[in-house]
Amino acid sequence: MLRRMIHELNAVKAFAKKERLRRLEAEKLLGEFRKALSDRDAELEASATALTSTKTLLYEIMTAAPKGIILCTPDFIIRELNPAGGRKLGGRVEEIIGRSLDEFFPEASKFLSSKGDGEFSLDALKANDLSGSPITVEVQGFAGAFTSEFRYLLLFRDITDKVKEHERQRLFEQQIDEARRLEAIGALAAGIAHEINTPIQFIGDNLDFLKDALKNIHQSYTRYEVLRGAAASDDRYKAEVAEIEAFNQSIVLEKVVGDILSALADSRDGIRQVRDIVLLMKEFAHPGTGENEEADLNAIARNVVTLCRNRRKGIAEIELELTADLPLVKCRRGQIQQVILNILLNALDAVDEAKPPVGRIRIGTAFDNNYIKLSISDNGKGIPDSLRQKIYDPFFTTKPVGKGTGQGLALAKDFIVKGHHGRLGLIDIEGFATTFLIELPLKAVGVRPAMEGASAAA
């Protein structure tokens, strides 16, 4: 009996010990769980704080950003807009949110409809503000599934004033170019007036001759008509007939007719000369379209030399060494004419100042796989090494006051390098003091057939 009680007591002790261990294990697990919950709460609180900070930061960025920021749905409904965007679109944020992007950027929505995911940019995009007034904007953005609600992010800035200023600058530069072109024409004006005056003068002389000659012929013909019927039957008119025959012999009718035909031919040639000069001047003075066009550099060079024909008299002979099979080149014809004329006028001034025994200017053309080249050489006074880097500076000139503006070579450099991505520089050629080389990128679309007189002295 005692043994059984001791056994049961031991069993109870063992059970109690196990229960105590289980309780300790449970308390330990409960402590770990409480700690895990506490850590999780801390993490959630930190995440909430970070999220709040991120939202605050994003709001501050959206508010402070100088560019307009738009978030759109896949069907181009504006859901988010920052204050700068509202100002640029001419309204309050709440007035614009919920509207379609088409109301403000119709071209952008068309573009985005055909574009996949990724970055995009739109320069000088035509847009409208809330009142419908036109504006011009520059847009950078991203297309992609940000969330189920947002697909397009647009950052834009209003460049309306910049575009207007650029247009004003373009018009101003166009006016400057026109003034420079007219300045070059002015330098040729006296020579061109002489070129036109000479044929006009002999045309006038020929017309005076024709008037007198035709008057004599008319008088002879009138007298013949009066006496034609009577002379054959009435001896009283024999004296008058003899007088008419003597008059006809005195004016040598056959010679007069020949002189008339010669005078007409000379007059026709004079008119052609005037027409050619006027057409060249018209082509040169016209500002052109400003677009690239196919041009024959040989023909341009010949035209410029023709315009300078009187200006060069007594100064220099101009030799043309033009490659007959020169390809056509894409260029702005008016600008290239202006460059060649400016350099040629400088060459004439240099030769005139140096006064060599025989003034020489040579214009040559050539080409390789990359460039079409035109060189203008003269045996004038030359350009010192110390000035070779300055000659392209605006307003730099070595000419006397009133004779040079210092714009010719600056303009030439601008036209060739900036306008045509070409090259303009000085090279050394034996027998000449100065040689300018113009190189235009070769974009030939055809080759002119060989022409007679491709190499000749002008």
Image (spheres, grey):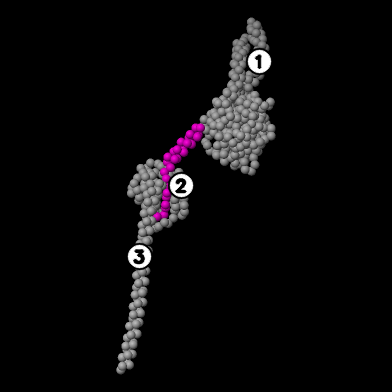
| Residue located 57% across and 30% down the image | 397
Q: Is residue 423 above or below residue 399?
A: below
Gap between marks 2 and 3, in whole Å?
A: 47 Å
Q: Earlier in the sequence, mark 2 or mark 3?
A: 3
Residue 353: x and y in percent read 63, 26
Question: Which image quarter holds the N terminus?
Answer: bottom left
Question: Which image quarter holds the C terminus?
Answer: top right
Q: Nearer the viewer, residue 417 or 336?
A: 417
Q: Nearer the viewer, residue 235 or 57?
A: 57
Residue 283 falls inside the magenta stretch: no
**In this view of the protein, can residue 105 be seen by the observer?**
no
Q: Which mark is residue 253?
A: 1
Q: Which of 375 and 279 is in front in this view?
A: 375
Q: Do the residues labelled 2 and 1 touch (CB within 8 Å)?
A: no
| Residue located 61% across and 34% down the image | 386
Tag 1: residue type? Leu
Q: Which of marks 2 and 1 is nearer the N terminus?
A: 2
Q: Residue 41 carries which label?
A: 3
Residue 451: x and y in percent read 66, 34
Gap between marks 1 and 3, in whole Å?
A: 129 Å
Tag 3: residue type? Asp
Q: Which residue is disc 2 drawn over?
A: 122
**Which of the 4 image quadrants contains residue 241?**
top right
**In this view of the protein, can residue 315 be seen by the observer?**
yes
Q: Do the residues labelled 1 and 3 touch (CB within 8 Å)?
A: no
Write down the region rendered in magenta. Answer: 150-176
- Secondary structure at badge 2 equals strand
| Residue located 52% across and 30% down the image | 179
Residue 195: x and y in percent read 60, 24
Judge depth for marks 1 and 3 and give the one in front: 3
Residue 343: x and y in percent read 60, 32
